[in-house]
Amino acid sequence: MLLCTSGHILLMLQRQTTDPTAEDRLRGNRRPRDARKAGGHRLAVVGSAHVWTPPRTMLLLLQLLSLLRELTAESPWGLPVVADGPASLAKVVMAELADLKLENKPWPGGTHSLHYHYLALSEPGPGLPQFLAVGYVDDQPFIHYDSRVDRAKPQAPWMAAVDTQYWETETQKQRAWAKVQQVETWTVMGYHNQSSGTHSTQRTFGCEIQEDGRTSSFWQFGFDGQDHLSLDLETLSWVSAKPVAVQTKRWWETERCYAEYDKAYLEGLCLTSLHRYLELGSQSLTRKEPPKVQVTRHTAEDGSITLRCWARGFYPRDISLSWWLGEEELVQETEYVETRPGGDGTYQTWAAVRVPTRMENGYICHVQHSSLNHTLTVAWEAPSHQWITSAKVISIIFTITFLLVAGVLIFIKQYSQGGEEPHNSQNPMSVEAAQLLC
């Protein structure tokens, strides 16, 4: 009996437990000074990016890797599996690894996250990749893999200096993930009674650390853009989003160590890797840029008025927007949207509130951000050009009305004089209208 598939486990553990004398190099060909022991912790390798890992974790990883190297069988994933021989011990080691939580230090500058997004297509069309992988730190891409190019490449300036060994390792890892997810794609297609056509699977997972040291993580799997499965990290069980996903759930439940390893990665090595990437990109990722705040006024078809408080160009992501009327915060009355990337390495968001007509000036938007040393307050101000435009419109209306009245008076005067036709060629109506205007 086969205990668990281990393709992705093997390929990732090989990256994380490689001989440090060969891969403990982030830049150049020599070992960095911080490659020695420090504070009772051993420096582990995650794709040549160094993270501090407790000795027990390293021991478990090395022990598990030695078990996986004994494998000869292949799983439905197309990669090695744990067979009968070392199965029981591997299960114990994996369970210990899943239950082991690493000590995480808080990181200044708000909440930070490390996310990966994978996409696989069954039959990609022209110009489309069969597999695509993108890694993000704080919603900023830092690594990219496209099966058409077949190379992992940096997406952030602070990753460009990382040595070639890191990129070679990442390339090999993403190639293996591409094979795994292709098998998943076609298997799930079968569960949907589909044997051809373009279909996709999406895998997204990651971890987050807040400024006070609290952490969270997630793992989700989708099919054709719809939620399919997610991992409950507390119970180590797969949660199906729809009835057809139950078949995938049963398949993965037979591979118990899959969930255990995902938990171990998300709550351990993912967080320590995030710390390392924050160190590498500290100048960019820990910078602070204040928000540019503006309040706009919008009138709906029914005449209702909405004030919208915009915050743009700020970094880091965490921000607080609120609407106040006097000393009262309008929590229930305020509409919020999720903060989203602005496309230039900063973020943007808004908060809106409906207000009575001609009461706009009483509403104040409060903005709090780590880049500000005080709460910023902004109110709506009527644009000065609005009054100029209104004056022009009134002037035009007055002129047109005056001309119409003058024309009517001249017409009445002509007929009151007997309706005689003028003998000169010039129109008397236009002459008298001109005299009235002068």
Image (cartoon, helix red, strand yellow):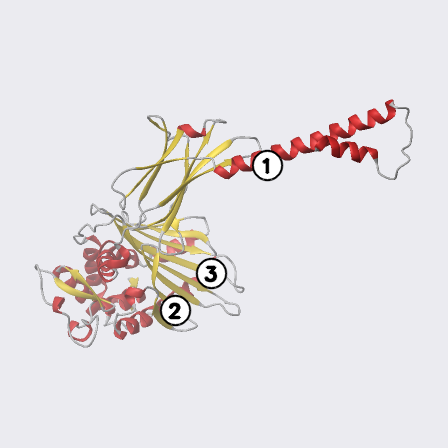
Query: Along the polypeptide, which appears first: circle 3 or circle 2?
Result: 2
The residue lying toward the viewer, choosing from 192 and 88, is 192
Secondary structure of the residue carrying tag 1 is: helix
Q: Label 2 belongs to which residue? A: 179
Query: Along the polypeptide, which appears first: circle 2 or circle 1?
Result: 2
Secondary structure of the residue carrying tag 3 is: strand
Callout 1: few (<14), some (14-19), or many (20+) C-alpha neighbours within 10 Å? few
Amino acid under disc 2: Lys
Horizontally, residue 211 falls left or right of residue 195, namely: left
The residue lying toward the viewer, choosing from 20 and 291, is 291
Residue for point 16% across, 52% down: 103
Amino acid under disc 1: Lys
Q: Label 3 belongs to which residue? A: 200
Image quadrant in which the C terminus is located: top right
Secondary structure of the residue carrying tag 2 is: helix
Viewer can see residue 76: no
Amino acid under disc 3: Ser
What is the C-alpha distance between the residues marked 2 and 1? Answer: 69 Å
The residue lying toward the viewer, choosing from 388 and 30, is 388
Q: Label 1 belongs to which residue? A: 392
Viewer can see residue 405: yes
> At which x and y percent is residue 66?
19, 70
Q: Which image quadrant for residue 116?
A: bottom left
Query: Along the polypeptide, which appears first: circle 1 or circle 3?
Result: 3
